[in-house]
Image: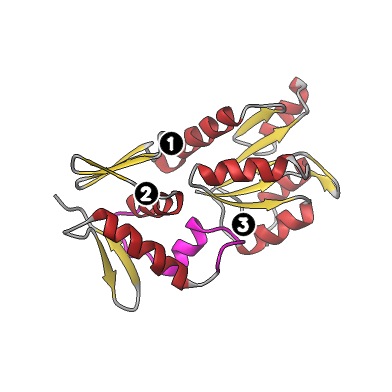
Amino acid sequence: MRILLVEDDRDLGPVIALGLRDEAYAVDLAATCAEAEALLCCNDFDVACLDLGLPDGDGLALLRRLGADPLLRRPRRVIVLTARDAVDDRVAGLDAGADDYLVKPFSFQELAARLRALSRRSDVREAVLHVGDLRLDSATHRAWRGGGELALTPREFSMLRYFMHHPDRTVSAEELLEHVWDAHADPFTASVRVILSRLRRKLGAPGPITTVTGVGYRLRATR
């Protein structure tokens, strides 16, 4: 998943972003409403983790605009992360369109678990994926081919997970950049080719990921 983290705490934001990247998510960090809107204008996000008390506006107002402003691309899911713990605040956040509401201070493990739950809920995607002889467990960040476990880096794991969510569909390098990388990564398709080459070597033969000349790449089921 590609995640937009909107958090104005200059200490907390980078720590959460680092933890999410270690969980193999692509994360873009914004500290203000304006920075979040700039990212939402030109990127598709699977989840937004949204703080409410932002220096240039109320995150709740931004949440409401996500469903009304045609210039903003609404993430598939939204988690509110806030110190506002009153029942009325929770109700207001959920009524404004949030899918989940997590009160600070929270443990990172709980945030990670809620993200996994949202992933399972979104498009009826399961935490454990199966494509041919490939198996991937999003909760434990482990993957196997046949009976052997694959030693994947977080980026390789994230790429394989994206392919396994879209089996037998041609995926372009640009699409992989959009969903597997974040805004601070090398914005060139050469990055995709490097990671894909490493992933293919680890998957072994016969190679389940094929090249569709001039279009992109496709994961096919193999036994």
For this rendering, which residue is in front, 216 or 66?
Answer: 216
Residue 168 appears in view: no
Horizontal and vertical percent position of residue 107? 62, 27
- Contact, CB < 8 Å: mark 1 with mark 2? no
Residue at 35% over, 70% down? 216
**Crowd rating for badge 3 (residues with CA inside 10 Å; few <14, some 14–19, many 20+):** some
Left of 9 or right of it: where is 138?
left
For this rendering, which residue is in front, 194 or 182?
Answer: 194
**Crowd rating for badge 1 (residues with CA inside 10 Å; few <14, some 14–19, many 20+):** some
Q: Which three-letter amino acid code belongs to the residue tagged 1?
A: Arg
Q: Earlier in the sequence, mark 3 or mark 1?
A: 3
Q: Which residue is mark 2?
A: 152
Q: Which three-letter amino acid code belongs to the residue tagged 3?
A: Arg
Real-space Cα separation, disc 3 to disc 1, in angstroms: 21 Å
Asked which quadrant contains residue 59, the reply is top right
Q: Which residue is mark 1?
A: 120
Q: Which residue is mark 3?
A: 73
Asked which quadrant contains residue 183, the reply is bottom right
Q: Which three-letter amino acid code belongs to the residue tagged 2?
A: Leu
For this rendering, which residue is in front, 89 or 181?
Answer: 181
Query: For the magenta stretch, what is the residue range?
Result: 165-186
